[in-house]
Each structure stands twice: as C-alpha cells, then as structure tokens.
Amino acid sequence: MRRIVRSGRRPRVRIVTRRIKRMPAAIRATAASPVEKPKIAPRPVTSLTLVGSPAWREPMASWLEYEPSLVLAAEIDPANRPKHMFDLPSADVVIVSTDAGDPDASVELALELQAKDRGTGIILVLSGLRDDMARRFSAYAGSWSLITSKTSADPVKLTFVVQSSARGIHVVEPAVTKMLEAGWRVGDADEAQAEQTHDPDLTVTDEAA
C-alpha cells in the first residue's frame, strides 16, 4: 500500500489592492469644517416707566422681574413727582395708573413724559371714568392705549398691549370704549337739559308768559 505524503505547502493567498476614490477637495473641506449653527437674534427688550401709587407699582415691578423681554426703567409717584423730567431715564413705554376721581395729575405727567421723548408709547390704566372726563379721554384714544385695571393685572394681556404700544400700535379696550360712549351720552343729555333751562333765545316777555 502506497503511502501518500502531502507536502507542507500553504495555499497561495491572492491580495487584491483596490483603488480608493479620493473625495474632491471642496467636499473634503466642507466635511472637515464643523457645521455652524444658525445664529438666533436676541429678543428685543422693551423698557418701561411706571406712574402711579406705590400700592399699584409694587406688584407691577415684581411682575417685570419674571419678564425677560421687559425691563423697568423708572418708577414715579404723581404725588411726589420729580422737579426735572429730563433727569429721568428714557423709556419705550409709560404705563400710567389714573385715579378715577382726579386723573389730571397722572395725565399731565404722561403728557410731559411723552413730550420729553416723542417716541414714547403711553398706556393709561383706567379704574373708572367720570362722565365729564369722557370727551377728554376720547381725544387720547387716537394716540394712547387705554385699558382697564383688570387688564393691567393680566400679565399676558398687558404684555401684548406693551409690545403693541412700543411699535406705535394703540390699543383701546372694548370696556373703555363703553365707558367713553356712556360718558358722551350723559354729557350730551346734561347739555341738552342745560340748554332747555337756559335758552338764550327766550326773551323776558317769553319767560314771563
């Protein structure tokens, strides 16, 4: 019996070299450079001046601490108003809380602040309205924002009014419009009654008759 002796040759291994396709230089540069994130524009900040009694200003100032888009510029008490208005910092918007019984001091202060800085938006907060003041406040409705005290206590609604006033858009709340219309009606009725009582066309003879 013939014995088969196998040689110790190892099987040949064929090595195949593959050509690696090079990436174009422009694409390599783009892939190597880090992807830049789009820059987000900073949120605009609106400065505010608060005009009113300390009891009204304190909660308003506390609310502004949690509003990153709003910043408090100054606080003014109409009863202790500064002598020189130009010493106060400028503000984008002035919120004025008016006294229903005597709003003149607050309104005059608002007029002076707007005269100092022509671009300042004015927001009047009306807790009530005397009938004889309806005509005067109707004139402000075209250039100032008029809201109720209830709206001023609502952070969402007040922020909307402030941002609108800063852009020159005046907001007149429907409840204020109703107060103005009611004041106009009462004023017209009083004038008509006064004209009937003191009619300048009546002569002495007519009155005697």
Image (cartoon, rainbow, N blue to C red):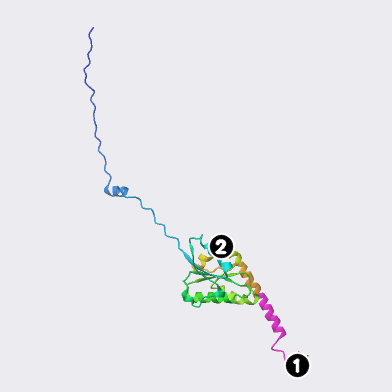
Residue placed at 49% from the left, 71% from the top? 120
Give the SS element for disc 2.
Answer: helix
Residue placed at 75% from the left, 90% from the top? 207
Quadrant the C terminus occupies: bottom right
* Apparent side of residue 42 relative to residue 164 in the rendered image (left or right): left
The residue identified by callout 1 is 205
Which tag, 1 or 2, sits closer to the chain's start?
2
Q: Position of residue 29 (x, y in %)?
A: 29, 49
The magenta span reads: 184-205
Residue placed at 77% from the left, 91% from the top? 208
Do the residues bearing badges 1 and 2 touch, measured as CB atoms within 8 Å?
no
Q: Quadrant of residue 124?
A: bottom right
Compared with residue 1, is residue 89 higher up or lower down, i.e. above or below? below
- In the rendered structure, which amino acid carries the disc numbered 2? Lys
Residue 86 colored in magenta in the image: no
Q: Position of residue 51 (x, y in %)?
A: 54, 71
Q: Quadrant of residue 97?
A: bottom right
Front one among 46 and 11: 46
Quadrant the N terminus occupies: top left
Q: Position of residue 107 (x, y in %)?
A: 56, 75
Q: Is residue 172 visible?
A: no
Which of pointers 1 and 2 indicates the residue nearer the eye?
2
